[in-house]
Amino acid sequence: MNFLKQLYYFSRFHTVIGTTLSITVLYLIAAAGGAAQHLPLLLFTLVACLGANIYIVGLNQITDIAIDKINKPWLPLASEAFSLQTGYIIIFIGLAIALAGGFASSYFLLLTIGISLLLGTIYSLPPFRLKRFHFWAAFCIIAIRGLVVNFLIFLHFQYSIVHTTHIPFLIYLLAATIFIYSIIIAWFKDMPDIQGDRAHQINTLSVRLGVPRIKNIGIAVLLVCYLMLLGCFALFFSGGQRVIGIGLHLLCAIFLLFQSKRMNPVEVPSIRRFYLSMWTLFFVEYIGFAAIGMI
């Protein structure tokens, strides 16, 4: 049980939920009324992508042990609950699963996994170690979560199920929304980690601009995003899709402002809870778009 608990921390479980939810929603939209007929395809895709997810987050921890001893001392490698050898074994198993799944499936899944693994590797490993540079660190997260997953995984399901590569407007709108969320997550994920990042010369936006300023900029960007989504659903959708789209983003805006007011910018636990609330909004977007796509 202790191993499973540490594996839960090692996998950064909120990212596992995000990957699982995004892939499942894209499958439901692509499969439309025939979702039950292609469940093996969904499960196969999930296993391959979760393998890549665990490789990426695990590699980041392996290269960040000294920083995590300051920022996240409960993580298995930083706390020494896992040995470095155990960490390597887990990420290489994830890598093997991801590559095997990619090569055994469609070109689109292979491309998704290949791009994700490449960006995840150069994000963490020298000589690139792109996480040192706020622009390139954000680029890696935005590219994978915002663009690669939404377009290529949808095309993977679409091609595998109905043998077409048509992308509907709803997927473009979903990708644009998650693109914005990926920017915010890329900015906000460093807010609780200023102390360790500064000590190890990781030049994040939070280090450069400070937590209050980054929080305010991020909230402003999300609120503008919600206004644009309200306009899109009012103009280009009708019936139940319009009602869900507008209602969903009004509730998201209220939740965002509530969480912002609760956050104390000088208390790390409060900052971390605020950051995780962005993942809650990320999850809600996918659930909402799934409901809209299945009407």
Image (spheres, rainbow, N blue to C red):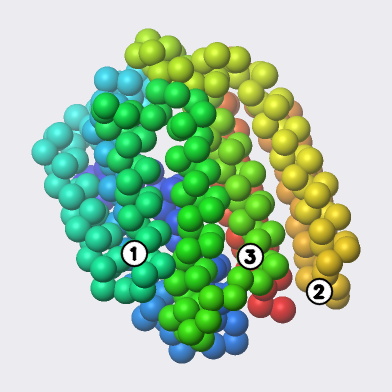
- The location of residue 267, given as percent across then percent down, is 56, 18
Q: Is residue 21 visible?
A: no
Distance from disc 2 to disc 3, alpha carbons, whole Å, reads: 17 Å
> What residue is at 36 percent from the left and 70 percent from the top?
107
- Around disc 2, counting alpha carbons within 10 Å, would you say few (fewer than 14), some (14 to 19), or many (20 or more)? few
Q: Element under label 2?
A: helix
| Residue topped by disc 1 | 110
Per the image, label 1 sits on a secondary structure element best described as helix
Q: Which residue is mark 2?
A: 240
User: Label 1 amino acid?
Assistant: Leu
Left or right: 88 in relation to 72 = left
Question: Which quadrant of the view contains residue 237?
Answer: bottom right
Q: Residue at x 26, y 68 (%)?
A: 103
In primary-sequence order, the first of circles 2 and 3 is 3
Who comes first in sequence, dot 1 or dot 2? 1
- Tell which residue pokes out farthest to the right in this image: 235
Q: Residues within 10 Å of mark 3 (few under 14, many from 20)?
A: some
Q: Quadrant of residue 58?
A: top left
> SS at mark 3?
helix
Q: Could you tell me residue 180's position as x and y percent?
A: 64, 44
Q: CA distance from mark 3 to mark 1?
A: 20 Å
Which mark is in front, 2 or 3? 3
Q: What number is the disc on residue 171?
A: 3
Q: Whole-percent x and y of residue 168?
A: 66, 72
